[in-house]
């Protein structure tokens, strides 16, 4: 069985190499190129969750027109950045990009379904698959970077994903989809976000601008948590949709600031 898995992995890598050409030295790309790949792969995590959120809003009748715009915007950005990742692709991430591409196609097809509870069950599983694939790709690029910068970009991007995942869990629960899993998932997201924020606040690489934006993100998160705690009415669902977008806007500022930090080659991550 392991031989078969190895063969399939090699086949997938070869397929991507044929479909998406890249230079032979891609694994030795400049550090700033790898940092961009970390940011783009990390953003795929968020975009998959935002796609699900917008689709769920339509299913629940929560600002459906605005949700349709967010969905179209997120799908287009995912497609664009996945194509850019393929150009930046390194040998270390080939098979992972094949998997991400396949999982995204599956989710994208599911998002074309008419909103409803049965389709939402499908979206729940497919969005999770994309999240897992994107997380593995992000970790591969982060490891390839070998620097604290890669970790900072990945961690900041994960906060953006969590802001959308929190809203997803509330909306799935409102539709009666995987209610136990969504309640547990929301609690886990809230804890993970607090942990991630604490880690970023302690980063010695932070500039004064980053520290200021982190403080604003913390304030915004408190407001968002207030909305999450009161999710039992149509108005509450609307508030969650709105505050999740405000939260994302603030976190995107942080993502961009971390991605713009100069690489200090002396500050590297340990192999462990």
Image (cartoon, rainbow, N blue to C red):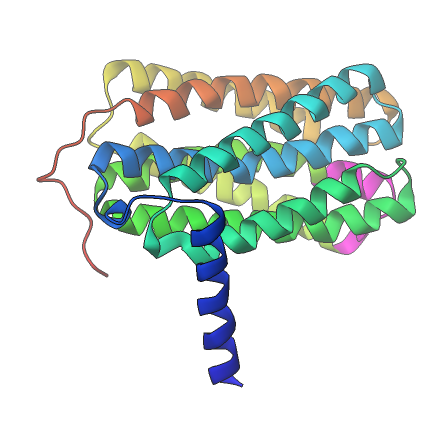
Left or right: where 60 falls relative to 71: right
Where does the image place residue 8, in percent across and percent down from the top left? 52, 71
Looking at the magenta stretch, what is its main secondary structure? Answer: helix
Of residues 62 and 9, the one nearer the viewer is 9
Residue at horizontal 71 percent and vertical 45 percent from the top: 107
Left or right: where 94 falls relative to 178: left
Residue at horizontal 82 percent and vertical 50 percent from the top: 121
| Rendered view: 135 above or below 232 | below
Residue at horizontal 62 percent and vertical 38 percent from the top: 48
Left or right: where 140 falls relative to 76: left
Query: What is the span of residues highlighted in magenta in the rendered image?
Result: 169-180
| Quadrant (top left/top right/bottom left/bottom right) for the N terminus | bottom right
Left or right: where 143 falls relative to 167: left
Of residues 2 and 143, the one nearer the viewer is 2
Where does the image place residue 38, in percent across and percent down from the top left? 37, 39
Residue 183 in sight in this render:
no
Residue at horizontal 72 percent and vertical 53 percent from the top: 125
Where does the image place residue 59, in percent across and percent down from the top left? 87, 32
* Magenta-span inclusion, residue 160: no
| Rendered view: 181 above or below 71 | below
Of residues 127 and 8, the one nearer the viewer is 8
């Amino acid at each position: 069985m392991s031989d078969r898995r190895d063969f399939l992995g090699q086949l997938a890598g070869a397929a991507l190499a044929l479909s998406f050409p890249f230079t032979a030295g891609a694994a030795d790309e400049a550090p700033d190129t790898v940092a961009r790949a970390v940011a783009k792969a990390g953003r795929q995590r968020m975009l998959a969750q935002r796609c699900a959120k917008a689709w769920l809003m339509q299913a629940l009748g929560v600002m459906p027109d605005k949700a349709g715009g967010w969905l179209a915007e997120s799908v287009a950005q995912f497609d664009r950045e996945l194509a850019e990742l393929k150009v930046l692709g390194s040998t270390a991430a080939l098979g992972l990009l094949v998997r991400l591409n396949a999982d995204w196609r599956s989710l994208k097809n599911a998002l074309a379904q008419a909103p409803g509870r049965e389709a939402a069950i499908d979206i729940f599983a497919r969005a999770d698959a994309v999240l897992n694939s994107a997380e593995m790709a992000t970790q591969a690029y982060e490891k390839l970077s070998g620097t604290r910068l890669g970790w900072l970009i990945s961690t900041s991007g994960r906060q953006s994903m969590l802001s959308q995942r929190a809203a997803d869990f509330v909306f799935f629960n409102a539709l009666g989809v995987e209610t136990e899993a969504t309640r547990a998932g929301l609690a886990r997201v809230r804890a993970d976000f607090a942990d991630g924020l604490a880690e970023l606040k302690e980063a010695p690489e932070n500039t004064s601008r980053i520290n200021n934006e982190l403080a604003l993100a913390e304030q915004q998160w408190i407001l968002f948590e207030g909305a999450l705690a009161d999710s039992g009415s149509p108005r509450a669902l609307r508030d969650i949709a709105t505050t999740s977008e405000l939260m994302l806007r603030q976190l995107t500022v942080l993502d961009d600031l971390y991605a713009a930090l100069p690489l200090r080659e002396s500050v590297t991550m340990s192999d462990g």
